[in-house]
Image: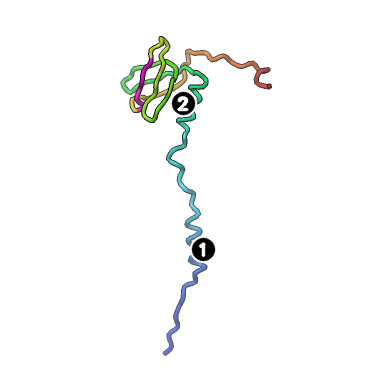
Amino acid sequence: MIRKLIKPNLREIKQKSNRENKRKPPPPYKTHAETYYYIKQMNNRTQLVLELVSGEILKGLLDWYDEKCLKIKKLDGRTLIVFKSQIKYIYKNPDFAEPKREESDQKK
């Protein structure tokens, strides 16, 4: 009795593994969107409202930011350092009217 050795077809195995490996990789952990937002608000000198976890509301300008805290320059001239973990919401001050650009300025 002669036994025949059965070899697997390596091409088929490679094609199957390539199909499985073509999955989309997960997004990066840091998107830098937060950093971009802070830089934009600092450059535009936008007045912000910070609502803290305790319910307190702070209004002022973003002076600088760090990995764990923000430095806010309040409207009365005082400065505060607020930990990011204590911030519930950040949004633009609706009472502050930003000067709008004229259409002629935008076209240039």
Q: Estimate the x, y position of residue 49 in percent, counting from the top left.
A: 42, 18
Name the residue beneath numbered marker 2.
38
Q: Nearer the viewer, mark 2 or mark 1?
A: 2
Type of amino acid at the residue the image marks with label 2: Tyr
In the rendered image, residue 56 lying in the magenta stretch gets the answer no
Q: Estimate the x, y position of residue 78 in percent, counting from the top left.
A: 38, 12
Which SS class for mark 1?
helix
Looking at the rendered image, the quarter that the N terminus falls into is bottom left
The crowd level at tag 2 (other Cα within 10 Å; few <14, some 14-19, many 20+) is some
The crowd level at tag 1 (other Cα within 10 Å; few <14, some 14-19, many 20+) is few
Q: Residue drawn at (51%, 67%), measured in percent from left and top? A: 12
Name the residue beneath numbered marker 1.
15
Q: Estimate the x, y position of residue 90 in percent, counting from the top left.
A: 42, 23
Question: Quick one: label 2 or label 1, which is nearer the N terminus?
Answer: 1
Residue farthest along the left direction in this orientation: 54
- Asked whether, in this view, residue 29 is left or right of residue 103, the answer is left
| Secondary structure character of the magenta stretch overall | strand
Residue farthest along the top direction in this orientation: 76
Q: Residue drawn at (49%, 18%), measured in percent from left and top? A: 46
- 16 over 72 or under it: above or below: below
Q: Residue drawn at (50%, 58%), measured in percent from left and top? A: 19
Distance (Cα) linking label 2 and label 1: 47 Å
Looking at the rendered image, the quarter that the C terminus falls into is top right
Q: Estimate the x, y position of residue 44 in percent, counting from the top left.
A: 52, 20
Which SS class for mark 2?
helix
The magenta-colored residue range is 79-84
| Frontmost residue, 74 versus 91 | 74
Type of amino acid at the residue the image marks with label 1: Gln
Q: Which mark is residue 72?
A: none
Q: Quadrant of residue 91?
A: top left
Residue farthest along the bottom direction in this orientation: 1
